[in-house]
Amino acid sequence: MIRVILYLFGAVAIIFAAYGTSHAADAAPPAPGGMHSGQMMHDMPGGPMHGGHMMGGQMMDDNRTPLNLPPMMAQHQKANMREHLKAVTEVVHYMGANDFAAASKAAKEKLGLTVQMKQMCDNMPNEAFRNMGLDFHKSGDELAEVLKTKDAGKSLKALDTMLAKCNACHEMFRQ
């Protein structure tokens, strides 16, 4: 179970490091033996700010839909995604400590569809992005409910379902 949790956490960290940051100071530290790909993308011509991204060491066109949010709204939304990553880390930590009550509370309060998160999603101008955000937060609520059962296997499946929603959104949209 710990190996699966570490794998999931690593995958989420890579995704958020590559797509969820916009400044070098926010970037994750480099992976052992190589440059952090998210930072490399920002430093190279054709990086995300120029419509390209790295895939398998080659520059690729970035065909994701740009959200074109106003700068302040974009920064707020990115900060919110980084908070979601911290919340996933917290949930995984509590699961590893067999504290499913604390994991459920963190999932509900920090990943679930709270009034604040619903308001934020409702303010997103892109309907598909808005709906994906609402689905993500609903899956956070579902994760919180499954965690209450203290069933590690079912909890990991619920976490996987929620993280799949993160990946799907990052595959479709960019800032």
Image (cartoon, rainbow, N blue to C red):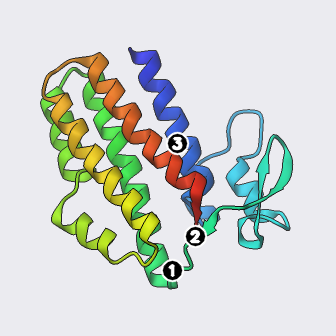
| Labels 2 and 1 touching (C-beta < 8 A) | yes
Judged by depth in the image, the label closer to the viewer, 3 or 2, is 2
What element does badge 1 sit on? loop
Near mark 3 (Cα within 10 A), the count class, few <14, some 14-19 or many ≥20, is some
Relative image position of residue 23 (x, y in whole percent): 61, 67
Judged by depth in the image, the label closer to the viewer, 3 or 1, is 1
**Pointer 3 or 1: first along the chain:** 3
Query: In the image, what residue occupies the spot 30% across and 22% down?
Result: 96
Quadrant (top left, top right, bottom left, bottom right) of the C terminus: bottom right
What element does badge 3 sit on? helix
Residue, disc 2: 175
Query: In the image, what residue occupies the spot 71% across and 61% down?
Result: 63
Q: At label 3, which amino acid type do we have?
A: Ala
Q: Quadrant of residue 65?
A: bottom right
Residue, disc 3: 13
| Above or below 120: residue 162 | above
Query: In the image, what residue occupies the spot 52% across and 42% down?
Result: 13
Relative image position of residue 163 (x, y in whole percent): 43, 40
Q: Is residue 71 left or right of residue 153?
A: right
Q: Which mark is residue 69?
A: 1
Near mark 1 (Cα within 10 A), the count class, few <14, some 14-19 or many ≥20, is some
